[in-house]
């Protein structure tokens, strides 16, 4: 392993004049695709393990969402056309002369994900189609190695701790989704820190059946604004400036009403990997991987494993030493997962400590796989 450690005094972004952070909430069309892709991968992995004692090759990180159409109105409304979802990718459909019903497993997993994770939105609002193809022979060969080998030459990136801006943006989405009943799961939060002020723009899809009047809608917007300001003041020293649903006008036809709590019902399409990274955020002022981690194979796919591992290493360095850390891991196709081509760590911690943490995490790299299979780790 080639370990390069760059000694830094702290997180330079903390001292910059400007920072931009975004989070696409659970019900954003892109996040819906991420969640569906990951749920299908978990379901296939479970089926493979039950039948054959191991996870067979698959990648289900190709999910496309085509928005439906709806007619929301105060105190009601209806979905006119369902949300269309195409589940694609590749999977092992036959092994040891036994056929695996991949498409049915995928469809069942997708419906279950929606019904288990959303309030107003249900699988009945969707039209699902599975067109998952058979995996290639070459990839089966790579996958069948006794020691897990990398399936790609790629890299993963992680950093810890989060800045106050990053913490605020993440907390705002989570809190609004859990605490304001008029709001659905489609909440996008954009944070711009500049000169000690945090300007936050919230796009929150309200649920039309829970909005009693136009006045109630604007009261809900004010509640969102006040809650967001409170979160920012509680977990940072930044001065909040909050804007909510800024495209609204003063009439019922020009406010952010939805029947199901997501813009996917009325014009916004989605794809896997166009949203949050594995830390749940989009951070253009940071080094980031553009890999779509959700749905990628949890055993050998570097696009998933090294991004999750890099984040884990960075968090462990911070937790055990108190020092900021940014970690970059580079793989080489066909090489063992626990032997990265390069490991780069930026931190203020001594080399011996960093080496010990990196070695420990690489030795237990299969724990990342197990956490993915149990659904204990988020990829978006």
Image (cartoon, helix red, strand yellow):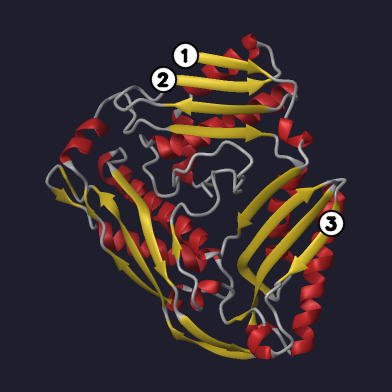
On residue 2, which mark appears? 1
Q: Disc 1 to disc 3, how far (Cα)? A: 44 Å
Q: Earlier in the sequence, mark 2 or mark 1?
A: 1
Q: Is residue 147 left or right of residue 80?
A: left
| Residue 240 in which image quadrant | bottom right
Position of the N terminus, as image quadrant, is top left
| CA distance for labels 3 and 2 | 43 Å
* Whether residue 274 is situated above or below residue 309 in the rendered picture: below
Q: Residue sitting at 74 percent across and 87 percent down? A: 250
Which tag, 1 or 3, sits closer to the chain's start?
1
Q: Secondary structure at mark 3?
A: strand
How far across and how far down the image is residue 100, in percent?
22, 53
Q: Nearer the viewer, residue 284 or 185?
A: 284
The residue at the point 49 percent across, 39 percent down is 289
* Picture disc at residue 240: 3
The residue lying toward the viewer, choosing from 55 and 313, is 313
Q: Are marks 2 and 1 in contact (CB under 8 Å)?
A: yes
Give the spatial CA distance, label 2 vs label 1. Answer: 7 Å
> Can residue 105 be seen by looking at this rendering?
yes
Q: Which residue is mark 2?
A: 341
Q: Sort mark 1 into few (<14), some (14-19) or many (20+) by Cα contacts within 10 Å.
A: few
Q: Quadrant of residue 140?
A: top left
Residue 376 sits in quarter: top right
Name the side, left or right, on which 41 lies relative to 170.
Answer: left
């Amino acid at each position: 392993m080639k370990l390069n450690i760059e000694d830094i005094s702290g997180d330079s972004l903390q001292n910059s004049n400007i920072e931009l952070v975004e989070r696409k909430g659970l019900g954003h069309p892109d996040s819906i695709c991420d969640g569906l892709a990951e749920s299908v991968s978990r379901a296939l992995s479970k089926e493979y393990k039950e039948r054959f004692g191991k996870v067979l090759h698959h990648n289900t990180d190709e999910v496309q969402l085509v928005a439906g159409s709806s007619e929301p109105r105060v105190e009601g409304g209806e979905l006119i056309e369902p949300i269309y979802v195409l589940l694609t990718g590749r999977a092992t459909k036959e092994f040891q002369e036994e056929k695996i019903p991949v498409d049915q497993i995928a469809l069942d997993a997708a419906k279950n994900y929606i019904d288990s994770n959303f309030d107003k939105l249900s699988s009945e609002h969707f039209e699902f189609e599975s067109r998952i193809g058979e995996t290639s022979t070459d990839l089966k060969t790579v996958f069948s190695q006794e020691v897990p080998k990398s399936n790609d030459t790629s890299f993963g990136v992680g950093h810890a701790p989060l800045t106050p801006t990053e913490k605020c943006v993440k907390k705002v989405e989570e809190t609004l989704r859990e605490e304001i009943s008029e709001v659905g799961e489609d909440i996008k939060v954009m944070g711009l820190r500049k000169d000690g002020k945090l300007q936050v723009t919230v796009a929150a899809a309200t649920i039309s059946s829970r909005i009693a009047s136009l006045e109630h809608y604007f009261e809900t917007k004010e509640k969102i604004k006040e809650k967001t300001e409170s979160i920012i003041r509680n977990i940072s020293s930044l001065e909040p400036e909050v804007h909510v649903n800024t495209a609204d006008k003063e009439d019922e036809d020009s406010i952010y009403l939805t029947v199901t709590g997501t813009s996917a019902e009325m014009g916004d399409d989605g794809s896997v990997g166009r949203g949050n990274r594995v830390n749940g955020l989009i951070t253009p002022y940071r080094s980031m991987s553009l890999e779509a981690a959700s749905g990628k194979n949890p055993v050998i796919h570097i696009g998933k494993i090294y991004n999750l591992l890099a984040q884990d290493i960075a968090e462990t360095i911070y937790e055990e030493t108190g020092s900021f850390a940014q970690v970059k891991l580079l793989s080489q196709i066909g090489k063992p997962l626990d032997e990265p081509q390069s490991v780069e760590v930026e931190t203020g911690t001594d080399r011996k400590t960093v080496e010990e943490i990196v070695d420990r995490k690489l030795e237990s790299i299969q724990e990342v796989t197990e956490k993915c299979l149990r659904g204990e780790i988020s990829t978006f």
